[in-house]
């Protein structure tokens, strides 16, 4: 493998990992330890002063988690990564490094519902002010810019599913404004789309979903694209100003194109504390080894189910970017030609009642508030995740009374369709 860049599937299995130096173990061991013995007093001092890389305490670094970080950085084409306890912790870590109270950031209004909550509520209480823009009308991003804007946040493949964002067009707006573009790549995964190649500066993931892929562990990650000049404008002081607790060291100057990941770790994770468990890192790493195989099957199954639903007499509409007639099909062909992912929505002619009946009648599909499991999942947002909203707000959020959301698993497509068929025959 000497000079040639290994392919994606090879990286998914090998990147970041070596046989365990202590034991020769081939699988990455779970380093279930909180602390690491220093070699001597000088090494301890060097580690605490950021003059040497090494392990001190699992809140900051852990050898199992380091393999996960190396692997995801390689898959995304970034310079470095920082794994944390959840996708939301990753978003918190990114904005903690970029913003000071009173700052603004622009976010797409087509995001995972939990992110909309995080930005509207907890972030506002930190004095970090979100300004919403509409990815269906790119000019709204430009109009939302102000002297206080420090970043733009979008999803590559967005909730409620089937919406592909024009990453390069929004990256051009960010570049012109001298601010970084952050892309949540959870639903697409780097197998389908690599946002850094399209102009993203930072990528975040909920590893909880397709990356781990088995519905068994929470995790999140921040990937540093290594593309942004943090010192140029002086508007990102955590990166460009001397740090008193590290003997006046300046993070961007010292660590260069992986300075953002370092700042998120040695300032953000150090103080915010949302560390991932080494056991979760191990499970997610194991999941990533089969990411290409799973995503292929997820996408093929989702397309088969979308086509089946499109022809069903109880179904009013299907929104899946993989369908030829979909409004996002051209963007899907550009940004994720291998597939449109596994999460999408459809509408039932029978409205709210039919939606509730459908989730009540499925047998193999699981009625849960999650996506990205090996198992096929179903939810009726209007009666669950979005029930606190008014009818008008529900419709604006893509969660109208008739909407059902699916996350298609890796079972046999005929069995997923058979379950939907028997349940749809009973919705009335
Ligand atoms: C689930 C999800 C998140 C939040 O991740 P957690 O791991 O649940 O904290 C963020 N973005 C997207 C697109 C998600 O699906």
Image: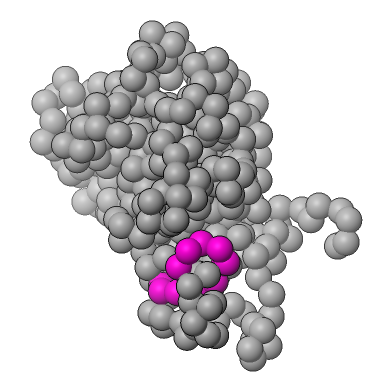
Q: Residue at x 45, y 44 (%)?
A: 242
Q: Could you tell me residue 106's position as x and y percent? A: 36, 23
Query: Depth check: 398 or 289 in front?
Result: 289
Q: Residue at x 44, y 56 (%)?
A: 247
Q: Residue at x 59, y 77 (%)?
A: 28
Q: Vertical placement of 66 versus 402: above or below?
A: below
| 360 horizontally vs 336: left or right | left
Query: Depth check: 233 or 404 in front?
Result: 233
Q: Vertical placement of 251 versus 156: above or below?
A: below
Q: Could you tell me residue 400's position as x and y percent? A: 23, 27
Q: Could you tell me residue 397's position as x and y percent? A: 27, 27
| 169 horizontally vs 101: left or right | right
| Span highlighted in magenta in the image | 48-58
* Residue lying at the far front of the rendered structure: 247
Q: Could you tell me residue 82's position as x and y percent? A: 48, 56
Q: Is residue 50 magenta?
A: yes
Query: Depth check: 261 or 292 in front?
Result: 261
Q: Is residue 128 magenta?
A: no
| 323 horizontally vs 242: left or right | right
Which quadrant would the N terminus be assigned to in this image? bottom right
């Amino acid at each position: 493998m000497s000079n040639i860049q290994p392919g994606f599937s090879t990286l998914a299995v090998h990147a970041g990992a070596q046989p365990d130096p202590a034991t020769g173990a081939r699988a990455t061991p779970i380093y279930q330890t909180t602390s690491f013995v220093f070699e001597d007093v000088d090494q301890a001092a060097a580690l605490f002063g950021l003059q040497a890389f090494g392990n001190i305490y699992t809140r900051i670094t852990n050898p199992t988690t380091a393999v996960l970080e190396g692997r995801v950085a390689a898959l995304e084409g970034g310079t470095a990564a920082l794994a944390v306890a959840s996708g939301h912790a990753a978003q918190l870590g990114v904005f903690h490094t970029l913003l000071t109270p009173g700052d603004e950031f622009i976010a797409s209004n087509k995001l995972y519902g939990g992110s909309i909550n995080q930005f509207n509520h907890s972030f506002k209480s930190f004095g970090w002010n979100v300004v919403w823009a509409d990815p269906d009308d790119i000019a709204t991003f430009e109009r939302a810019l102000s002297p206080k804007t420090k970043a733009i946040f979008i999803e590559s493949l967005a909730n409620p599913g089937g919406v592909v964002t024009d990453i390069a067009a929004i990256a051009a707006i960010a570049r012109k404004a001298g601010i970084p573009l952050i892309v949540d790549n959870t639903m697409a995964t780097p197998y389908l789309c690599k946002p850094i190649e399209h102009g993203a500066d930072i990528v975040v993931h909920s590893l909880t979903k397709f990356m781990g892929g088995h519905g068994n562990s929470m995790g999140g990650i921040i990937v540093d694209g290594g593309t942004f000049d943090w010192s140029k404008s002086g508007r990102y002081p955590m990166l460009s100003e001397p740090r008193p607790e590290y003997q006046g060291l300046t993070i961007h100057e010292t660590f260069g194109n992986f300075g953002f990941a370092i700042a998120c770790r040695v300032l953000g994770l150090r103080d915010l504390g949302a560390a991932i468990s080494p056991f979760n890192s191990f499970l997610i790493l194991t999941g990533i080894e089969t990411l290409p195989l799973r995503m292929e099957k997820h996408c093929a199954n989702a397309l088969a189910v979308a086509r089946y639903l499109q022809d069903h007499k109880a179904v009013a509409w299907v929104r899946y970017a993989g369908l030829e007639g979909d409004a996002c099909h051209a963007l899907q062909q550009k940004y994720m030609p291998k597939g449109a992912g596994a999460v999408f929505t459809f509408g039932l002619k029978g409205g709210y009642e039919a939606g509730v009946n459908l989730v009540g009648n499925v047998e193999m599909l699981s009625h849960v508030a999650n996506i990205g499991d090996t198992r096929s999942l179903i939810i009726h947002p209007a009666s669950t995740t979005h029930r606190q909203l008014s009818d008008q707000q529900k419709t604006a959020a893509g969660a109208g009374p008739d909407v059902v959301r699916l996350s298609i698993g890796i079972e046999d497509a005929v069995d997923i369709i058979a379950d939907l068929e028997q349940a749809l025959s009973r919705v009335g």
